[in-house]
Amino acid sequence: MEKIFKAYQFVGGHSRLFDRMMTSANLMSRLTLRLFWGLNAQAYQKFLAQAFAGVPKNFGGRLLEIPVGTGVLSLPFYKNLVGAEIFCVDYSDKMLEAAKLRAEQINLRGVKFFQGDVAALPFEDNFFDLVLSINGFHVFPNKMAAWEETRRVLRRGGIFCGCMYIKGENRRTDFFVKKFCEPQGFFSPPYETVSSLKNFLSEKYSRVEISHVESFAGFVCIK
Ligand SMILES: C[S@@+](CC[C@H](N)C(=O)[O-])C[C@H]1O[C@@H](n2cnc3c(N)ncnc32)[C@H](O)[C@@H]1O
């Protein structure tokens, strides 16, 4: 946990670089996305669509996002969810600082930010209508607790959705994850495959849909 915390505190302090990488904002980031993650322009758009596929249009309930990171992908998306009550959690206060700044810059009001651990969420059982997790489950060190907690705070009939890295789809990506992301504390094993994720989530949720683009799986589950 300490290693991951340090890694993301560092990223939070260099959030502009992270944001460029995540948004395919320049030539360098497009090359990185293509080379390491196998995402060309079209696949990147699919990756984005998949990440948010579970959030209904005009969603107006209580939404938890964990981990929000710098909010580079999600906060602009929330501008469309006018009636929703949005709670964003991340363990790294530096990442959260960047997210709060972004919310101000894009004039996104009313989003609540919390520093916290996905393994011990500070919310009551069944509190949320939707839990969104983008690029979190390949990072969280205590994955079982993370699966349990995200389910615990979701009401019956609520939606659990988002995306995560899965192994076994692109050898270059898997190599990069093992040799760089893991040792640097950006990712932590074990990782799911498309089928292990589907099987695992099907035991916990009544309806499960899994998609994938290269090494990223999208999931939409109903509790
Ligand atoms: C790859 S970033 C993803 C951020 C964002 N969802 C995105 O896609 O841009 C992973 C985030 O997980 C956070 N994180 C790592 N372990 C955590 C934990 N145990 N509880 C909550 N957040 C955690 C890190 O601080 C980091 O901001």
Image (cartoon, rainbow, N blue to C red):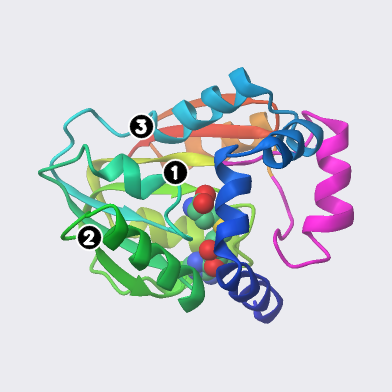
User: In front: mark 2 or mark 3?
Assistant: 2
Q: Is residue 119 left or right of residue 109?
A: right
Residue at (52%, 39%) from the top-left corner? Answer: 163
Measure the alpha-carbon separation of dots 1 and 2: 29 Å
Given residues 218 and 8, the one toward you in this image is: 8
Measure the alpha-carbon separation of dots 2 and 3: 19 Å
Measure the alpha-carbon separation of dots 1 and 3: 17 Å
Q: Which residues are magenta?
A: 164-191
Picture disc at residue 111:
2
Magenta segment: does it hold 110? no
User: In front: mark 1 or mark 2?
Assistant: 2
Q: Is residue 207 left or right of residue 134?
A: left
Identify the residue under disc 3: 54
Given residues 194 and 45, the one toward you in this image is: 45
Identity, as a three-letter code, of the amino acid under mark 1: Lys
Furthest residue in direction left, as rendered? 83
Residue at (44%, 43%) from the top-left corner? Answer: 204
Magenta segment: does it hold 176? yes
Please tell me whether residue 44 is drawn above or below residue 13 in the rendered image: above
Q: Specify whether tag 2 is near ligand 1 (CB below 8 Å).
A: no
Identify the residue under disc 1: 204
Label 1 or label 2, whichever comes before in sequence order: 2
Quarter placement of the N terminus: bottom right
Please tell me whether residue 120 is drawn above or below residue 149 in the rendered image: below
For residue 49, what is the image quadrant?
A: top left
Identity, as a three-letter code, of the amino acid under mark 2: Val
